[in-house]
Image (cartoon, rainbow, N blue to C red):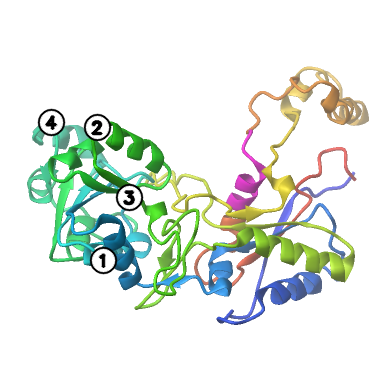
Amino acid sequence: MRLTGTTAIGIRLPIINLGDDLISIVADHILEVTKDAPLKNDDVVAVTEALVGKYEGNFASEDDIATDVRAKFGDAEIGLVYPMLSRNRFFRILKGIAKGTKKLHVLLSYPHDEVGNPILDINRLDEITDALPTGMVTAAEFKAVAGEFIHPFTGIDYLELYQEAGDNISLYLSKDPRDIMKLTPHVLVGEIHNRFTTQARLQKAGAKTVYTLSDILNQSVNGSGFNSKYGILGSNLSDTDSLKLFPNNSEEFVEKLRNLFHKKTGATPEVMVYGDGAFKDPLCGIWELADPVVSPGYTPRLAGRPEEVKIKLVADTVAKGLTGEAQRSAIAEIIKNKADNPDAFREGTTPRIFADLLGSLCDLIGGSGDKGTPVVLVRGYFDDYTVE
């Protein structure tokens, strides 16, 4: 019996510079790693979105953001609702938005943002909530009750940091996004995953203008990069002058890389671009997924979902009392015939799509720091217990 199942290997690449042929570089390194165990159709090659965005040259500046904000809101005062708390992910975006308006009212959620970054001591939540005035409060009123709060992972006071993003910024906090309309009917929704729900709530409540971050830089401004679907969502700090946007042509990249593998080896592995994994930190409560999706581009098979049998349920029922080869054969028989009994022994399996599961795995393997492994090769992922 084969002793290994799924394996994931981080692949080291040279530093990728603008203009490099990333597709050929990735293919050459994967083929070098697999020269003793050739690439297979069921293998998965995953490339981080950071490299793909750089390969595309998909960059934009604060001034590009400001230009688009002015184009969409004109001279109106703007209310920015529920942005995430992040220095790398949002501070420069906030500066760009502030540059694009004469007055920016920023409404933050509490006790944490959409992805779990806290803005107060969770252990004092009831005490703080009871002491706060009802409804929307200013940052000064909030701090008078909650005190100074430093994010436990980043070491940043986000109320202080976000105030530094522009002299025209006023900060507020509320548990109801519609409170922003007490200040202005022109609103930019800062949320990632709940953006359309909040947009609809604001429109229903009578807001005159409501855009989301996916509407900002959804087309090029003054020759800038852009993302037609996600705008500035998924962007990240690049250098002192620019942001790297979420890749705009991931599907094209995936197909080109897969076609190159087929040309060189005859194999057609699954290929995907991965960003943040979808998992939650158990200590701080942060949900890692700050990108709008785990994967912005992948081969069609990865849109599917696992159809797996829960082995421990089979072992405790059909194969109960059996041992050795008899036990293994009984379990293998259930797995081989699972297509004929799709509702059996599925309790507790996770029906997330392959792209989300694999992207989360690759985010953990590749890392976002100094591992130097922005490409991940996953093997044996589509095998089950019966495959030798």
Q: Amino acid at mark 3?
A: Gly
Q: CA distance from mark 2 to mark 3?
A: 18 Å
Quarter holding residue 318: top right
Question: Which residue matches tag 4?
Answer: 130
The label nearer to you, 3 versus 4, is 3
| Marks 1,2: beta carbons within 8 A | no
Question: Which residue matches tag 1?
Answer: 95
Q: CA distance from mark 4 to mark 2?
A: 27 Å
Question: Which residue matches tag 2?
Answer: 205
Badge 2: residue crowd in 10 Å (few <14, some 14–19, many ≥20)? few
SS at circle 3: loop
Q: Is residue 372 above or below residue 279?
A: below
Q: Nearer the viewer, residue 377 or 184?
A: 184
Q: Is residue 278 one of those drawn in magenta?
A: no
Q: Amino acid at mark 1?
A: Lys
Q: Is residue 360 one of those drawn in magenta?
A: yes
Q: CA distance from mark 1 to mark 2?
A: 28 Å
Residue bounds of the magenta highlight:
351-361
The label nearer to you, 1 versus 4, is 1
Q: Which residue: 34% across, 40% down?
A: 199
SS at circle 2: loop
Tell which circle, 3 or 4, labels the residue nearer the N-terminal end: 4
Tell which circle, 4 or 2, labels the residue nearer the N-terminal end: 4
SS at circle 1: helix
Badge 1: residue crowd in 10 Å (few <14, some 14–19, many ≥20)? many
